[in-house]
Structure formats: structure tokens, C-alpha cells
Amino acid sequence: MRHVLNAKQFTKKELEELFLLTDDIKNNPKKYSNKLDGKIIAVMFYEPSTRTRMSFQTAILKLGGKFVGTENAFDNSSGKKGETLEDTIRVLQGYADAIVIRHPSDNMPQRVASVATVPIINAGSGKGEHPTQALLDLYTIREYKKRLNNLKIAILGDLSNGRTIHSLLGLISNYDNIEIYGLSKKVFELPQEYIDMLNSKGIEYKKCNCFDDIPKDVDIMYHSRIQSERFEGDFGKEEYIINKEVLSKFSPETIVLHPLPRNEEICPDIDDDPRAVYFKQANNGLYVRMGLFVQAFEN
Ligand code: NCD
């Protein structure tokens, strides 16, 4: 049984295996169309989602499986009647062969894993982790850069509450010669625990104060939305916006990633630039998630 709970569970070897499998699924989807024959997956989302939920559901259907479950699960499940998450999992695993779950509590993965008898896939846990997003982010980096070592990566936006960034840092820290640059408003700086994690893997974290502090030949600029649903109060809008003028100062090889949805932080005037790969990135989510299901039922 293989859960997908957090980024740190993945070794470099496991990542490469998943990415090779994902390449094959992308190139030969028909070969995999019966892999989930007879399987039913529960898809429970306690927070809003477009890409993650629908790409998981599409992945299940493309692999020949079926799904049950609900969006808006706080209203549409017995959570509304006070049922604990643990009890809901205990019940669902009597019906389903695996459970995909998104939930606002940071410790959801530990809670569900403590009772799970079927594979659990974390589709986002509070501000903590979003491992499947980070897997598709890394897969996209590998696709465009043809390498995962020797990379300069700038992370921007809500580094404090952005779970996709937290998981991506966990995955990328497996690789050699990585430099991370962070640019955000003061209130959204990267928490010290992630800086410590990077340092413990020999990766220096360089805090930037403006776009000019990011090297012009940076390989990836990964922007993110201010996660306003995760804090009280109003800290205003994003100050560091990637638009045509900003992007023109960076290398023709610098790619722009974003987990989406975007707000104002990426101006649509760069959408047609070949360096803006965020919609292709979202599409890769389908194939990486198909890969995860194939692996979940392999062993
Ligand atoms: C992200 C999330 O849910 O954390 N969205 C996604 O899954 N692609 C990012 C976000 O909501 O800002």
C-alpha cells in the first residue's frame, strides 16, 4: 500500500520512477486505460478546487476506474453532523479502494494515515503540504529544463501560507546544486522551518527585496497567489507582479510556473510568451496523477 502524504517521503529514485512512468502514460495513454478496472476511488474535498479535483477525477476515468465522493465536503458530508475526519475515513475505506482528500488542517495526513487501510492521497492539507502539485511542478521543471540538478529557482508570492511551495521545496531539496531565491511581501516570507530544512540539505536560501535581486539567468520563477483564506485581516495585494516588462529583463530560458489559480501576480500580457508554462503545468497534473494511481495499486 502506498500513501502519498508529503514531499519528504519521496526519494530521488522514486521520483525518477514516477516521472518515467508519467512520460510513458503521456505518450501511450491507451496502454493504461484498464489499470483501474474494477476500482472505486473516494474523492473528498473539504476546500474549493478546480484543477486538483477534476484532474484526479479525470485520471481515474482515463485509467478505467470509477469515483465516488463530494466537493464542499464540510456541507455535503457527515462532517456537518460532527463526524471526525478519522471516522469518515474508517467508513469510506469500506467502500473505496483508495481515498483522495483535501482538507484545511495541516495535520490531516497524519490523522488519516493513523486509521487508513487503503492508499490515501493528500490533495492539499492546510498551509502545510500539497505533494501531488509539487510532483507535477517538478515533472514540468524536468520536462522544460531536462534536468533537476543545477537549478536556480525563484519562489514568489505567499511563501508563508503557500502549501505548493512548501512541498516543492521538500522535493527539490533531493537534488544537487540548487539555489533558491525568495521574493515576497514581508508578511508572506518563507517560515524559518523551511529555510532550516533547505540549509540542512546544503541549500542556501537567498531572500530578495526586489526583482533585481533575482539573477537574470534564473531557471524558474514560481509565483503563487496570496492565500487570503488562510489568515485574518487584509494585507493588501501582491506587490511583485510578473508582467511583460519584468519578464523582458530575464533570460529567454527562464520559465514561469504557477500552481494556479492566479490573481494579479501574473499579468495575462505574458500568457503568449513561450516562457509562461503554467497552463501546460496544470495539464501535466493529469498525467502525474494517473502515474500515482498506477503506482498505488502496483505493490
Ligand atoms: C493551489 C492550492 O490549492 O494550494 N491550487 C492548486 O491545487 N493548483 C494553489 C492555490 O490555491 O493558490
Image: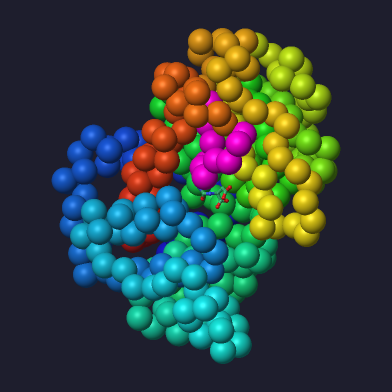
Judged left or right of residue 105, residue 207 is: right
| Residue 54 point in image, percent of width and height | 37, 56
Q: Which residues are magenta?
A: 256-265
Residue at x 45%, y 68% (from the top left corner): 71
Q: Nearer the viewer, residue 245 or 287?
A: 245
- Is residue 262 covered in magenta? yes
Where 172 sits versus 187, above or below? Answer: above
Residue at x 63%, y 17% (from the top left corner): 246
Residue at x 59%, y 45% (from the top left corner): 164
Write down the quadrant of residue 99 in the picture: bottom left
Look at the image and tell me in which quarter the N terminus lies. bottom left
Q: How many marks?
A: 0
Work out whether residue 156 can be spotted: yes
Residue at x 25%, y 59% (from the top left corner): 61
| Residue 289 point in image, percent of width and height | 38, 50
Colour mapping: rainbow
| Residue 94 point in image, percent of width and height | 39, 83
- Is residue 239 covered in magenta? no
Give the overall secondary structure of the magenta segment.
loop
| Residue 65 point in image, percent of width and height | 25, 64
Where 189 sits versus 212, above or below? Answer: below
Write down the quadrant of residue 74 in the picture: bottom right
Look at the image and tell me in which quarter the C terminus lies. bottom left
Q: Residue furthest bottom?
A: 81
Q: Nearer the viewer, residue 206 or 93?
A: 206
Work out whether residue 9 can be spotted: no
